[in-house]
Image: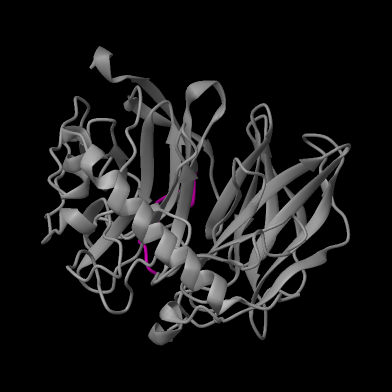
Amino acid sequence: MRPAQHKARFARERAAQKARVALRRPRLTRARVSLAIVALAFTGCASPAPVAPTPGPASPSRAAVAPPLEGGVEPVGAPTVLAVGLRVPWSMVLVEGRSALISERDTARILEFTDGSIREVGVIAGVDPGGEGGLLGIDTLIDGNATWLYAYFTAPSDNRIVRMPLLGTAGALSLGTPSEVLTGIAKASNHNGGRIKFGPDGYLYATSGDAGNTRSAQDSDSLSGKILRMTATGAPADDTLVYSLGHRNPQGIAWDASGHLWATEFGQNTWDELNVIQEGGNYGWPVVEGTGTNTDYLNPVALWSTSDASPSGLAYTQGTFFMAALRGQALWSVSPGGEASAWYTGDFGRLRDVIPGPDGTLWVLTNNTDGRGNPNKGDDKLLEIQLRDVSAG
């Protein structure tokens, strides 16, 4: 289903959002400003040495206020390879203990990793892979005694979200009959967005790309170039599905400990972005790539050159954000102080997704078999990374 959009309400939300930013601006601290103006210092105490992105022109007066992070961790040691032989993995979600579900973009398979082994749980019907489209983001919802698996995928006519009962127990999971949650998101050979996650407010969030139609990102009646928010069955969370607009191709979303939503976004030729997402906020695409001076749009809190990042999955854990970079072939961290560091650059090729793993770890998916990477032996892989408190570095 595709509930009607409401321009008038969205206009009111944008006006209210501008007022909130104006009120909060005087409370910027030095740590927040270091993010807002993209003056990122890069540190790290593990090999390889961190790589600094090239900062772009900034307009701190219009940057979204970066909420302060707390704590801070960093990778330590060499990652452990948990699984090999994956084919274009795109997204993953923990389901129980050390078990996880993994989506494969081109095969439309849902895989289960349990106790060091991989098995096929099922194939999502109706997936039409091509280019950057296919089976993309997944997440789960526990509702009473039922557990649902949600999947965002490219169908023959559109991008859509479905859900299906997740049956059985870890090591023997299966899928029930799917039902539609949201349809009618424009598809293309690229810029399909595709990340879905349930937020701390209980709503389902989804990232959609502009599907090659740049003007749609500024059209509040279009589902393209947006971050969408909905109930578990696809109804608008608050009269409109559009939570924020002006996005090119966002593919990573995560919430910090205070419940603020952050998102990664692919730039076109110059700047990749990390944004703090505000309800009703407009992030500028296609008018602005990176930072600008037009007060109608919110600036990112951090920028990378597209060759350094091309960010996909985003995770928050223990006070630090971690960003999986495809073209940059690195795991980027953004610390409480606003420092960004690149880890394992080039060691595992392209990285597609990252999530908080069990026992305080990170789990990462490589993405070298998608036609753009150079597969190594065993690709693609599921990796586990140990973390330590930054004060131990």
Residue 221 image offset from top left, x and y in percent: 55, 81
**162 or 143: which is nearer to us?**
143
**278 or 190: which is nearer to us?**
278
Q: Is residue 194 above or below residue 77?
A: below
Q: Residue at x 45, y 41 (%)?
A: 315
Name the quarter where the N terminus is drawn.
Answer: bottom right
Name the quarter where the C terminus is drawn.
Answer: top left
Q: Is residue 314 left or right of residue 236?
A: left
How many numbered marks does the figure carry? 0
Q: Residue at x 53, y 31 (%)?
A: 357
Q: Is residue 131 left or right of residue 288?
A: right
Q: Residue at x 35, y 57 (%)?
A: 19
Q: Quadrant of residue 275?
A: bottom left
Residue 121 image offset from top left, x and y in percent: 77, 50
Colouring scheme, one of rainbow, by chain, secondary structure, one colour: one colour
Q: Is residue 31 above or below residue 370?
A: above
Q: Quadrant of residue 389?
A: top left
Q: Main secondary structure of the magenta part?
A: loop
Residue 18 image offset from top left, x and y in percent: 35, 60
Q: Residue at x 18, y 42 (%)?
A: 33
Residue 257 image offset from top left, x and y in percent: 47, 31
Q: Is residue 70 above or below residue 226?
A: above
Q: Is residue 306 left or right of residue 387?
A: left
Q: Is residue 222 above or below residue 298?
A: below
Does 378 lie within the magenta span?
yes
- Residues rendered magenta in the picture: 372-381
Residue 171 visible (yes or no)? yes
Does 54 lie within the magenta span?
no
Residue 330 visible (yes or no)? no
Q: Is residue 68 left or right of residue 97?
A: left
**211 or 223: which is nearer to us?**
223
